[in-house]
Amino acid sequence: MHAAAKGHAVKEGPDRCLELLINANAALDLNCNQGWTAIHYGVVSNHEAAVEKLIYARCDPAEDNCEKKTPLDLAKQLGLVNMEKILNDPEDVIARCAKRYKNLTPSIGKK
């Protein structure tokens, strides 16, 4: 799966790659060795659309890393006001994304 995702990322861009992974019900909420999830990386990259799509895919925006920092903590630390708004209201993000991203089919069973 990772090789295919990498190939799509190069060819079609990271946004399309993320959409493919969401539609494939990939495990997007896994942690790296430092406890970071994809949402942590999306926040520090200030990639609002990716963070919204990950929340829509039911990745947990409140998950903390090994330093006990949540994505919201990182957004505050970096002064990312729009990102803070996204992370503070995941239910609104899910509702907006359901209307905006008709091509995404996140797993309904995830919470």
Image: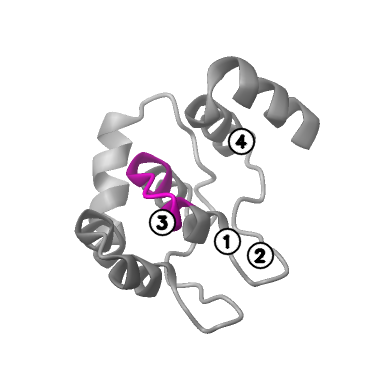
Tell me which numbered mark, 2 or 3, is placed earlier along the sequence: 2
Q: CA distance from mark 3 to mark 1?
A: 10 Å
Mark 4 or 3: the one toward you:
3
Residue wearing tag 3: 43
Residue 44 in which image quadrant: bottom left
Q: CA distance from mark 4 to mark 3?
A: 18 Å
Q: CA distance from mark 1 to mark 2?
A: 5 Å
Work out whether residue 62 or residue 104 is closer to the camera in this orientation and state it: 62
Front of the two marks 4 and 2 = 2
Q: Residue at x 25, y 65 (%)?
A: 79
Q: CA distance from mark 1 to mark 4?
A: 15 Å
Q: Which mark is first along the chain, 3 or 4?
A: 4
Query: Which residue is located at x 63 percent, y 21 percent?
Result: 10
Position of 58 with respect to 26 (left or right) is left
**Residue lying farthest top?**
11
Establish if 18 lies above or below 43.
above
At x 61% / y 15%, what residue is drawn? 11
Q: Residues within 10 Å of mark 4 (few under 14, many from 20)?
A: some
Few, some or many C-alpha atoms within 10 Å of disc 2 (few <14, some 14-19, many ≥20)?
some
Q: Which residues are magenta?
A: 42-51
Q: Position of residue 88 (x, y in %)?
A: 25, 66
**Relative horizontal placement of residue 108, taking residue 98 as reference (left or right):** right
Alpha carbon separation for disc pair 4 and 2: 16 Å
Extreme residue toward the bottom, this view: 68
Q: Earlier in the sequence, mark 1 or mark 4?
A: 4
Residue 21 - label: 4
* Residue 74 locus on image (x, y percent): 39, 69
Residue that carries the numbered disc 2 in the rendered image? 31
Tag 1–tag 2 contact (CB < 8 Å): yes
